[in-house]
Image (tube, rainbow, N blue to C red):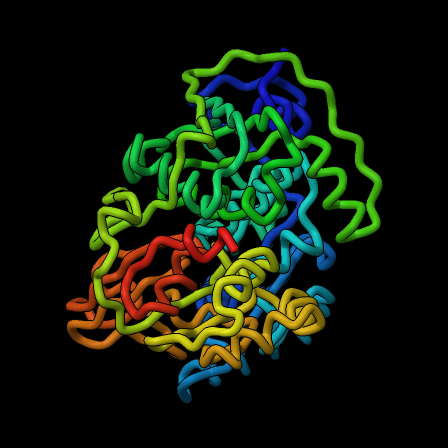
Amino acid sequence: MPTWTEYIFYRKTGRYPSPGDVVEVAPDLVGFHDLTGYHVLEVLEHMGKVEVFDNEKVVVAFDHLSPPPNQRAAEIMVYIRRHVKSLGLPHFFDVGGGILHQIILERYAMPGQVIFTADSHGNTAGAVGAFAHGMGATDIAAALKLGKTWLVVPAPFRVDVRGEFPLGVMGKDVALHLLGQFGAEGFNGYSVEVFVERPKVFPMDDRATVANMSTEMGADALMFIPDAVTAEYLKTARGVDYTPPSLEPGYYADKYTVELGRLEPLVAAPHSVDNVKTVREVEGVEVDQVFIGSCTNGRLSDIATAARILKGRRVKTRCIAIPASYEVFKTAMKLGYIDVLTEAGCVVTYGTCGPCLGGHFGVAGPGEVHLTTSNRNFKGRVGHPEAKIYLANPAVAAATAAEGRIADPRPYLKH
């Protein structure tokens, strides 16, 4: 029987290709945002005419420098809006709509699809079993114009997830655990397929976090094999009926098992995503700013976890919280999470990547220590190259905000 990767490529090419084969693939969806969209459209202009293969299969979102923090960002948005209007693209999300990857996940991505984005974290859609792959502006421009592109078929790598999350452990810790085991770029050339033994213990939000950070692992894609949680998510979020296929084990280049019960809250210390330590090893490090959000951890359960810890408390350091989309923000507001965070002293907005890439709304200064729920902690990633960036899950982030130093969230969650 084929692997999920082979099954997807078979649906696209009519044959089962081997790892290393070069194949042409027609995308089901193509996306870009403000930071990359300018270059995508510029390439299309150089090709002679700005046109796309199918208006219904293009998603555009303003998220990286949104709202525009300077004149140049505003100029870029004016430029992209003009093209969006002239092309008649219906799936356009202006300032405040949300982060591209969250929008694609909550509105469009389906199991078995092939999705290309002009951003490396488009792989977030792997949470529902889509083969989602980031590309450069030139490749995305070609895919938009031609309705196809080429790919080198990756080797399938199987990850089995067993057990259930212990207190204070989330999907972020699974991603950091894999980075600690295999290193940054450890899955280069692989398509990682994740089988969850007990689907309901691993919610969609946590799956999205793991899929998102497969970029840091170097994976061509990371896909959770569709199961009951996938079907429930699609029904609840979109009203779509979906029946997961029955899969027999295929042949994998390699395998690994994650035992959830053995994990504890983890932190990636400066200046690499695979410099992974337990929260106890870095506990007590004073922090200047905490960021809860991004396409990695700006979903509803992430905001809910932070609110649970910060309810009735005041933060002891700067804390910025950004739900990843307008839909997440609205729901969090209805459930009272936004009130809890603002009363705790957090600065709350929505629909921007801002602090994640050091774009605006919380840029790191020289010598500062930031703890963030985003996906990268390389030098200069969130601002000044002399800043020190720690990555952690939202529970660790909220506990850290409450104490002003890196803190273990488990004592806060026992009550």
Q: Residue at 59%, 12% (x, y): give it.
A: 249
- Please state the horizontal and vertical placement of residue 131, each as a whole percent of the image: 57, 37
Residue 15 lies in what quarter of the image?
Answer: top right
**Of 215 and 237, which appears nearest the observer?**
237
Judged from this view, the residue extending furthest toward the bottom is 71
Q: Is residue 92 shown to the viewer in this render?
A: no
Q: Residue at 66%, 73% (x, y): give it.
A: 333
Q: Is residue 415 shown to the viewer in this render?
A: yes
- Please state the horizontal and vertical placement of residue 207, each as a whole percent of the image: 55, 42
Task: State the quadrant of the N terminus.
Answer: top right
Residue 59 lies in what quarter of the image?
Answer: bottom right
**Of 137 and 228, which appears nearest the observer?**
228
Q: Residue at 58%, 46% (x, y): give it.
A: 125
- Please state the horizontal and vertical placement of residue 91, each as a whole percent of the image: 70, 64
**Of 406 and 100, which appears nearest the observer?**
406
Q: Describe residue 236's horizontal placement relative to residue 34 as left or right.
A: right
Q: What is the count of numbered marks? A: 0
Q: Residue at 54%, 41% (x, y): give it.
A: 149
- Please state the horizontal and vertical placement of residue 288, each as a whole percent of the image: 27, 73
Judged from this view, the residue extending furthest toward the front is 415
Q: In this view, does 328 lie above or below 68?
A: above
